[in-house]
Image (cartoon, grey):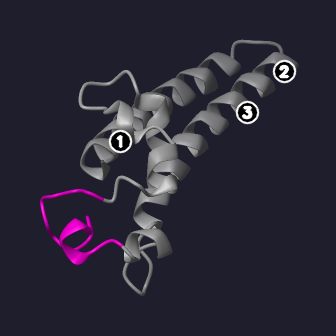
Amino acid sequence: MTAHLVPWLDQQLENQRHTGRTLHALATTEPPEVGQLLAQVGDYLIADADTKRRIIVEHRTEAGVCDHCFTVPAINNPWDGQEIDLCDTCTTIRLLAVPFAGEPGYQEGWRP
């Protein structure tokens, strides 16, 4: 699942960064109260996508991986260099994937 999720989140981050920059630029043309709101929404969009992407990175701990994924046999561990990604039962990863349910490659069985 992470093999699909990482590119989806990277694309979302790029889209939301672009939207955030656009909102900041638009904010300079609006009255202060509207401009401030637009800038805040832009900051939120960027932070939201960046945080989701960082959760994937932080999902791996010093001990290996999250407590759930650590219990999955090594061959199923997406962090061990295997091309097989069977840590699909991890709630963290599944929740992060929900917004991408309409994307090619998403499997309905991934829903939490």
Label 2 is placed on what type of residue? Answer: Pro
For the point 44% across and 58% down, the residue is: 90
- Whether 74 is among the magenta residues is yes
Is 79 within the magenta? yes
Residue interval drawn in magenta: 72-86
Q: Which amino acid does the dot numbered 3 rest on?
A: Gln
Point 12% across, 59% down: residue: 83
Identity of the residue furthest to the bottom in this view: 63
- Taking the spot 39% from the left edge, 76% from the top edge, the residue there is 71
Q: Which of disc 3 and disc 2 is earlier in sequence?
A: 2
Q: Nearer the viewer, residue 82 or 37?
A: 82
- Give the structural element (helix, strand or loop) at label 1: helix
Report how far apart the C-alphas of labels 3 and 1 lie in the structure.
21 Å
Report the residue marked by disc 2: 32
Q: Which mark is residue 10?
A: 1
| Chief secondary structure of the magenta portion | loop
User: Which is nearer the eye, 68 or 38?
Assistant: 68
How many marks the image carries: the answer is 3
| Labelled pair 2, 3 in contact (Cβ < 8 Å) | no
Q: Residues within 10 Å of mark 2 (few under 14, many from 20)?
A: few
Look at mark 3 in the image and give the residue it sits on: 40
Residue 89 x, y percent position in the rendering:
41, 55
Q: Residue furthest left?
A: 83
